[in-house]
Every structure is written in structure tokens, then in C-alpha cells.
Image: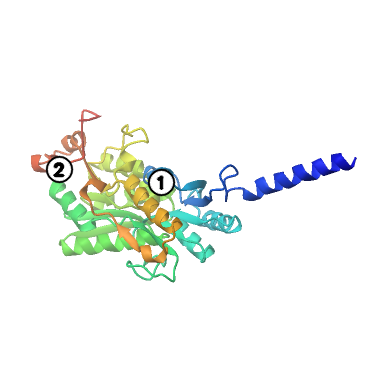
Amino acid sequence: MKKLLSVTLTLLLVSAVVFAGGANESASSGEKVYKIGISKFLTHNALDASEQGFIDYLNSTDLKVEFDRQNAQGEASTASTIAQKFKDDNVDLAYGIATPTAQALATALPNTPVVFAAVTDPVEAGLVNSWEGDPSILVCGTSDSSPVQAQIELLVELTGAKTIGNIYNSSEANATVQQQLIKDACSALGLNFVSAAITNSSEVRQATQSIIDRVDAIYIATDNAVISALASVQDVCDQAGKGLLSGDPSPLKDSDGNLTGIDALAAWGFDYYAIGVSAGKQAEAILKGANAGEQGSLVLEDPSDFELWFNLDTADKLGIEIPEDLLATASVVIKDGKIQ
């Protein structure tokens, strides 16, 4: 009996050591395994790409990592719940994709490094004190701040528009910042500006319908709620014969690179996978000992990190001829329903 009891206790002790290591330590090698919590605000191609780029990059490093991937499904309250879960789980680093999730993480995890992606203005969103970084705040990331004025200039060049319309989510800091940037850009270019506010994706079609007769073309920024319902904007534009430029090309293709049927006249914006890779590089530096706050807030500037799309089928329907010099700069040109 004593021998049996001794063997049983030994087995229990061994099991306790193995399970205590959990996500923090590899049972076979003793090498640290970092726990990373990923909180994505909702599912759409841009945010999905930012998630995948981050994961792929970290998996390519010599770090041992495991990911807890969560989706807030577009609900700020769910984002807060996820942030609390990561705090309870004592993650080594948290990754917030889009402004509401990044804000929730930064609030719940003041003593844990937080890396963000797809946040237009992290200062305005209250995530950081300055773009340059602050070692006292363990937050950094990669912004998706777009060249708004240049995008609108392109839309005007293509359509001759004198009044630009925009739909934006008034309940998200990222979106309200962009709405002001669009308004300012239109003012600087001598254009009229008409906007309609929404609070969730289900309102996008009605909001677009409410302004379509008062505008010459529609510009949509990297607004998560609106981009996730871009097909509705396109439908309204098609019915009215108005051009649409998307500041995010990702809704125009699926995860396999196939066209989705959203036939925007043009799209010009970031490759969100590259944004995820950039955020992953920041996370790697932090896990290897760098101060998170000192990483700062980055904006991608390499032309290869942007995509410019033109749809010649839509241009034909609108009676627009896209100049050859512009087509020569495009990443993607669509004709006869196919990528050329």
C-alpha cells in the first residue's frame, strides 16, 4: 500500500509540473512560450488580413508563441469582456485590431504591452500621448492613416465631381477622425461635402440612399462599420449612376484573391496584411525586451504597401475613360469581370 501511495504521489507531482507550465513553458525544452491575446473588432477582409499578417510574422521568428484569437463581433461591450479575459489569463502581450478593441485592451491592461493595428489616429483615440512614443505607456502599433486628400483628388480627376459624399460611423473615434479629414480635404480642394452618420453596419444602405441624390460621387474611408457593408454602398451608387472610391481595397477580393462583385470605380489603400506584419515586428521587439511605449506609432510609407485598383467595366458604365498613365500605376485592373 505504501509503495502504491508513493507511486501515485510521484505521478501527481509530475502532472502538476507539466500543467503548471501551460502556455508559459514548453514541457519538452523548458523554452518560454509567450501567450498573445488577439482581439479583432469584427470580421472583414482588412481586419482579417491584419490578424493573419501579425500571426504569420511572429510564427516566422524564433519566438515560441501561442495565440488566443477573439472577435468582438462589432460590439464595444464584447471588446471589453475580451480585454478582461486577457487580463485574467495574464497574457504576455495583447494585439488590438481596430480602435474599439485597442482602447479596451489599453484600459484593461495598463501593465501589459498592447500593440494595435488599423487605428487611424492613436492620439485622438486616447491610446498614446504622441506618435513618437512614450515609455511610460505600454502601447504602440501601426496606423492605417490614409492619404485622404490624394484619394479624393483621384476621385475628382476620374469623375469631375464637385460634391463628395461620405458615410461614417459616428460612434467610433477612428471614423469621426477620418470624417473630419475628408471634410477638411474637400474644403482645401474647393469641393462641397455631404455626409451621413451611422452607428452600425445595418444602417449603411439607408444612409447612402439619404445623400446619393445630393452628391456627384461617394468616397468611403477605412471605417470598419461602413467597409463591412460596402456592397450596400455600391448597390446604391450603381442605381444612381455615381462613382465610388473605397479607401480600402480589401472588400473587393476574398481571402483567396477572387473578386467579390463589389465593383467600385476605384480603390486605393493599404495592404492590411503588411500592417499586420509591421505590428508583428513591433510585438517581436517587445517580447525580446524592448519597451513597448518606445516603439511609437508607425505609418507605412513604402509604395509596395499600397494597392490601387481600377474597374474598367464600371468606368464604361459611367462613361469614364481612365487615363493610361493612371492605369500604368495600378496594382489591379479589372476588365470583363476579371483581373487583368
The amino acid type, in three-letter code, at marker 2 is Thr
Which residue is labeled 2 in the image?
329
Name of the residue lying farthest toward the front: 3
Q: Could you classify mark 1 by the number of other residues whose Cα lies within 10 Å: few (under 14), some (14-19), or many (20 or more)?
A: few
Across and down, in percent, residue 284 comes to 41, 53
Seen in the picture, residue 321 relative to 127 is either above or below; the reply is above
Q: Is residue 206 visible?
A: no
If you read the primary sequence from the N terminus, does the residue marked by circle 1 or circle 2 appear first? 1
Q: Nearer the viewer, residue 327 or 201?
A: 327
Question: Looking at the rendering, in which quadrant would you find the N terminus?
Answer: top right
Across and down, in percent, residue 102 comes to 45, 58
Q: Nearer the viewer, residue 231 or 40?
A: 40
Left or right: 17 with respect to 196? right
Across and down, in percent, residue 88 comes to 61, 57
Question: Looking at the rendering, in which quadrant would you find the C terminus?
Answer: top left
Q: Nearer the viewer, mark 1 or mark 2?
A: 1
Dot 2: what SS? loop
Across and down, in percent, residue 66 comes to 52, 46
Left or right: 224 with respect to 216? right
Distance from the alpha carbon under mark 1 to that under mark 2:
33 Å
Seen in the picture, residue 75 relative to 242 is either above or below; the reply is below
Which residue is labeled 1 in the image?
61
